[in-house]
Image (spheres, rainbow, N blue to C red):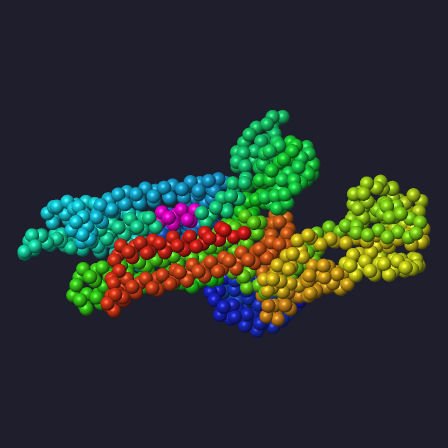
Amino acid sequence: MEHQILSIRGMTCAACAGRIERTVRKLPGIAQANVNLASEKLFVEYDASALELAAIKAAVTKIGYEAFEKPAHSQATITIGGMSCAACAVRVEKAIQKLPGVISAGVNLATEKATVAYDPGQVRLSAIKEAIVRAGYQALDAPKANAADEDAARKQKEVKTLWIKFIIAAVFALPLLYLAMAPMISAKLPFPHMAPMTHAWVQLALVLPVIAVGYRFYTVGFKALFSLSPNMDSLIAIGTSAAVLYSLYSMFTFKPSGMAGMGMEAMPTLYFESAGVIITLILLGKSLEAVSKGKTSQAIKKLMGLAPKTAILWQDDQEKEIPIDEVEIGDILIVKPGAKIPVDGTVVAGHTAIDESMLTGESMPVDKKAGDSVYAASLNTTGTVQFRADKIGSDTALAQIIKLVEDAQGSKAPIAQLADVVSGYFVPIVCAIALAAGVGWYIATRDLEFSLTIFISVLVIACPCALGLATPTAIMVGTGKGAENGILIKGGEALETAHKIDTIVLDKTGTITEGKPAVTDVLPMVGLSADALLRITASAEKGSEHPLGAAIAAGAQSKGLALFAAADFNSLTGRGIQATIEGQAVLAGNRKLMEERGIPLGEMEEAADHLAAEGKTPMYVAIDGGLAGIVAVADVMKPSSRAAVARLQEMGIEVAMITGDNQKTAAAIAKQAGISRVLAEVLPQDKSNEVKKLQQEGRKVAMVGDGINDAPALAQADIGIAIGSGTDVAIESADIVLMHSDLMDVPTAIRLSKRTIRNIKQNLFWAFGYNTIGIPIAAGLLHLFGGPLLSPMIAAAAMSLSSVSVLTNALRLKRFH
């Protein structure tokens, strides 16, 4: 049977996936066909003698989809300027997706970035940028090496500009509001007496600067409106324009006349103050929103800030300081004590200790000598070293971590799909409601001012921004917080799935245990000391490549025992080794080896069984044909494993252990760790089947492994968690990568997922609830039953606060510990 994975293009929903599966399964020679809609892949098992791969592709093509063996696409991240709400993000997505050759396009409002997968053979990156510009937005240049600094500077400038605009607007809007409202509030308030038309002209003079600083609402809003894809700016532009135009109409059709018997003059009906205050409040909201958005991406800034900006190049027997961008592969660089490693490389001269805690979480500095690897942003603590640059720019371990976090922050969680759909139709629906409410009230009351107030209030209170920001801001803060704690979550989908996990399968070696065997017991026969037995065994094992042999040699060296020279070394596969030490024939191995050579085990057999029951591997040692004792080796359990298992069980999650070890050894380790369910004697290739069996029981399964031989199981699980050093961050098959090799990070990752999803649900509830309640009130629902009428200015304040409240709620995740 042949196994093949085909990438599928053109699917839009689960029905498409089902159709492809049914079509392929009908072909002769097909044993199995499964389509993964999320990864857009077809997993097929077929008889190659009865069916060719081309026939499978042709069958898929015939029903309207594309099938190919390798993902034939490039991916680009484009920074977008000019977006103001969720409708803008949807509009940009649609503009990009219309292009032939674009496979997928996702726009994240919070990061202001579009992630586009496209076929370079059909569409160029420049054409994608042109489509963004045609839609009315700016497509900024692709990220450069110092993109973080440029991006931060751009956003800082944007915040500063918004604050300046708000201050200018407030300076004119406050006196405008006083002029308009003071006479209505109290006759005792000081108020300059002026003719009605002079009063109107002063208000117009005060509102014009406010409109000028808020010009973007009009240029962007009307452009979007005329393109038949209105956004939040369109709502503000229509609402304030209606207020200003009605006020101008009232001014120029006004006929002065004294109010009989009251000594007061009639005034034209003006709404200049509504327009001025609405723009001012929305500028305040936008300013606060920009500040909050900046805080959501602080985790990325912290990671980027770890890397040094310069490196010291050793060239022509001289030191030369160069920018980090100019380092080339193969350059010899010098790092002095207290300085950071600029790029990944290999030490060629010198000796030092390097603090790699930013990658591995280990607080103790690691000794480095010629031939050892060093990683960008780690700290050189003691000596000066020269190293060769092996990986630069986006290939360094740190850059891989940053890319993982950025990709995760740019991804969408399935929970956001409803908000995305609603955002696409939201603004046109609001416009329709505003128009219907305005016309309805005018028909009922014949009062143009009243119906205009309703019309403006509905347009201004609606907030698509809160919908658009609800999910991405929480994902950005959640994944960023994870990165700060050494937990790299690869996307919104992983974050959402992790909170549903009810079963966790832990690989034994390297996950529950240290993954480094160590000598635990030395049991010599009478007449031989423990050190003598260990010395002879280690001398024989010194030439062995087996991990157990290496552990025995390391155990003797740690005790300071000098090893003898070994002669006639021979590795006996699956049984042990033999060698000649100081003229004596030494055998070291398992029971099978002793039985082969006819060496009786005697009382040592019971001791060996006892050691095996404790999860240790007993190794019999014979000298000149007689049993000399046992040396036991075990993979020691990590200090945090038991506590991590207990924490997971407290959270209501069942924990299982999977291992290739025999049942007795596995049960002993599981007992130490507090695990009741053991899957023993499982070959690496069968681990994924064991995970599948658990899933067939209706469980949501997470698999925790070292990300190398566990790759199939990690891919099969609902969530794959790779536990290993931070240099292995590009483990493709895992959804979550734990950089610190600490099992306590598993319950932390699950808790973070639960907190983030809860935060997203709160945000969506607020965003939907606010609009569901706010729009009917603005449309005069309360007034219909004798209640108050909502002022457009209050509506604008509520709208501004709704976005800020969603962002503030997302930022609460920063307090996660």
Residue at (44% x, 40% y) in the render? 150
Q: Residue 763's x, y, as percent?
A: 42, 59
Q: Position of residue 390 (x, y in %)?
A: 62, 40
Residue 288 painted magenta: yes
Q: Position of residue 179 (x, y in %)?
A: 19, 48
In the image: residue 288, left or right of residue 669: left
Q: Position of residue 21 (x, y in %)?
A: 55, 70
Query: Which residue is drawn at the image coordinates 88% and 58% (left, top)?
Result: 604
| 430 vs 582: above or below | below
The magenta span reads 286-294
Q: Residue at x 47, y 44 (%)?
A: 143
The stretch drawn in magenta includes residue 36: no
Most common secondary structure along the magenta stretch: helix
Answer with left or right where residue 496 lies relative to residue 112: right
Q: Nearer the viewer, residue 376 or 322?
A: 376
Q: Is residue 344 above or below residue 627?
A: above
Residue drawn at (62%, 49%) of the image: 740
Q: Is residue 537 left or right of residue 280?
A: right
Asked if residue 767 shows in the view, the reply is: yes
